[in-house]
Amino acid sequence: MFGYANDQAYLRLAQELPRFQKPVAVVSLFIPSLFARNLGDDRPHLGPGLSWRPATHRSWLGSLFRFLAPYHSEAKIEQGIQTTRDVLIATATLARRRGAMPLVVDAQYGPESPVERMLRRRILDESGLAYARVSLDRRWHLKDDLHPDPRAAHVIAMAIAARLRAGLAQQASLARPLLQ
């Protein structure tokens, strides 16, 4: 699989977050269209309950076939949903322990498919995680690459800033003593 899965991002955060004295926020990405990354078992990975799982080794031909014709059983998808939820909740918990505000960004290119909607609902809505849903024009990606172009990056950054400002303002109002 190409790119980081959510468990790899969590493990990296756990390793690097102690280096920061006063982190303000921890921003995670969850993109339903890239959920398959969280199902990859060709590398060491976290399973449900954040249990460590070794890589599954396949022949070169088997790996090529899985890449060209990906298939995941319902049980594997359910496991992936639970693991992704566990990882994002653990990420938020890690952020809060360090005094940082957790936020998940759900970037969506074009209309949301029924499968993407189900994943967002099951992983983000049902977990109660704070997230910013960012709708992007499907043309706003790098040439020959699905990563965000400068327009999309700007929209994502503005959505993150707005959510963090709102969250910090809410924290400040809760921290003020009540006037009598």
Image (tube, grey):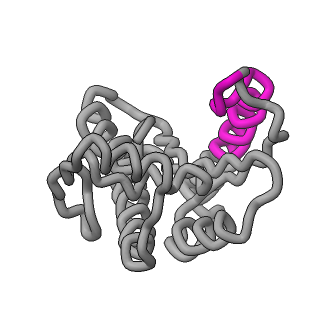
| Residue 106 as seen in the image, left or right of residue 35 | right
| Residue 153 as seen in the image, left or right of residue 33 | right
Above or below residue 89? Residue 60 is: above
* Residue appearing at x 76%, y 60% in the figure: 112
Find the magenta span and give its range.
144-165
Number of numbered labels in the structure image:
0
Percent coordinates x, y for residue 120 in the rendering: 61, 65
Percent coordinates x, y for residue 172 in the rendering: 60, 49
Above or below residue 82? Residue 61 is: above
Quadrant of the rendered image containing residue 90: bottom left
Percent coordinates x, y for residue 38 in the rendering: 41, 54
- Is 157 in the magenta? yes
* Residue appearing at x 83%, y 33% in the figure: 139
* Residue appearing at x 80%, y 26% in the figure: 151
Q: Tell which of 82 and 156 is nearer to you.
A: 82
Q: Is residue 50 visible?
A: yes
| Residue 165 as seen in the image, left or right of residue 26 | right
* Residue appearing at x 72%, y 24% in the figure: 149
Q: Tell which of 65 and 157 is nearer to you.
A: 65
Task: For the C terminus, give its image quadrant.
Answer: bottom right
Q: Is residue 98 visible?
A: no
Quadrant of the rendered image containing residue 11: top left
| Residue 115 as seen in the image, left or right of residue 25 | right
Task: For the N terminus, give its image quadrant.
Answer: top left
Looking at this rendering, what residue extends furthest in the front direction?
A: 61
- Is 74 in the magenta? no
Q: Tell which of 59 and 166 is nearer to you.
A: 59
Percent coordinates x, y for residue 61 in the rendering: 31, 44
User: What predominant SS class does the magenta segment belong to?
Assistant: helix
